[in-house]
Amino acid sequence: MIPVFTVNLLPDPKALEDKNLTVVQAVQTDQKAGGKYIGEQLLKDLGPNGSATVGIVGEPTAVAANMRDAGFKEAVAANPTVKVVALVNGKVEETTSLKVTTEMLQGNPQIDVVYSDTEPAALGALAAIKQLGRNDVKLYAFVDKIGVKHIAENTYLKAGAIQEPAKLAQIQIANIKKFLAGDKLEPLVDSPPLLVDKSNAAGTVERLIEIEPCRNWAATEQPESPNRFPACASSTGSTFKCGRAPSTACSDTTAPASRHC
């Protein structure tokens, strides 16, 4: 059997068997832990005597989303005055989430907290909250780059959890090395996502920008904004546009498809 190592992926067991492949180890985000972190942050923000009426913008047909929701509900259950009163399906689509969040808030005007289990749902919910003029509604969500920027602004989106694929890859690479050295690995490694709030959002945005992949440029091409995106010559003669400050050199120590600034 050929050993396979996965990162945030659930491969088809039958397809693996047909190709004589076997998964030695799967490294994945602990989705439930992420939802729990967000719920705990909500309770912290409310304080010991706080209360909230919550509406969820989710995706009930997705396993990962349901795990996130379960973690969130488990955490907020510690405060009996925090009530989840509605769940709508945003279908992991910003436009759909805008529509269903609008309907949810109009049908349940007592809702003062919205929890979204994906970034597209969060962005749609955010648009709905703004359009309805509901300045009293706070948003908590699973996020990516755009969501983290909104958390840094800290107007509506107060906190969230973000997956860290680079961290998962580092864990897996380290464990592949152990496997090749003869060590026995655990079949599953759950790694919690990062909780982001106002205190660390700006730094998280900066870190996300730093790990954006460099783009391969022909020697005759020039970056659109030389002051922001310096062109760096690699050891192979190619140039790269990198999203760092001009004073920062680009790295050419990895394979072309995964070069990073």
Image: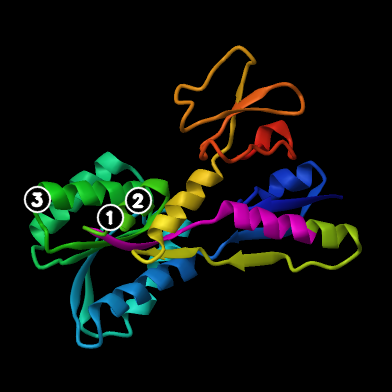
> What residue is shown at x 36% (from left), y 76% (from top)?
40
* Whole-number angstrom distance, CA of label 1 to CA of label 2: 6 Å
In the image, is 114 to the left or to the right of 13?
A: left
User: Measured from the top left, where is residue 177 in percent x and y?
Assistant: 83, 58
State the residue in front, 182 or 177: 177
**Residue at the disc numbered 3:** 132
Task: Give the structural element (helix, strand or loop) at label 1.
Answer: helix
* Whole-number angstrom distance, CA of label 2 to CA of label 3: 22 Å
> What residue is shown at x 66% (from left), y 37% (from top)?
259
Give the residue type at disc 3. Answer: Leu
* Mark 2 surroundings within 10 Å by alpha-carbon count, few (fewer than 14), some (14 through 19), many (20 or more): some
**Residue at the disc numbered 1:** 153
Q: Is residue 15 visible?
A: yes
**Residue at the disc numbered 2:** 149
> What residue is shown at x 14% (from left), y 49% (from top)?
130
**Extreme top residue here?**
220
User: Measured from the top left, where is residue 134 in percent x and y?
Assistant: 10, 57
Foreground: disc 2 or disc 3: 2
Task: Give the structural element (helix, strand or loop) at label 3.
Answer: loop
Q: Is residue 136 above or below residue 103?
A: below
Asked if the residue at tag 2 contacts the one at tag 1, i.e. Cβ–Cβ closer than 8 Å, the answer is yes
Task: Look at the image and give the residue range highlighted in magenta.
Answer: 156-175
> What residue is shown at x 76% (from left), y 24% (from top)?
236
Q: Is residue 235 magenta?
A: no
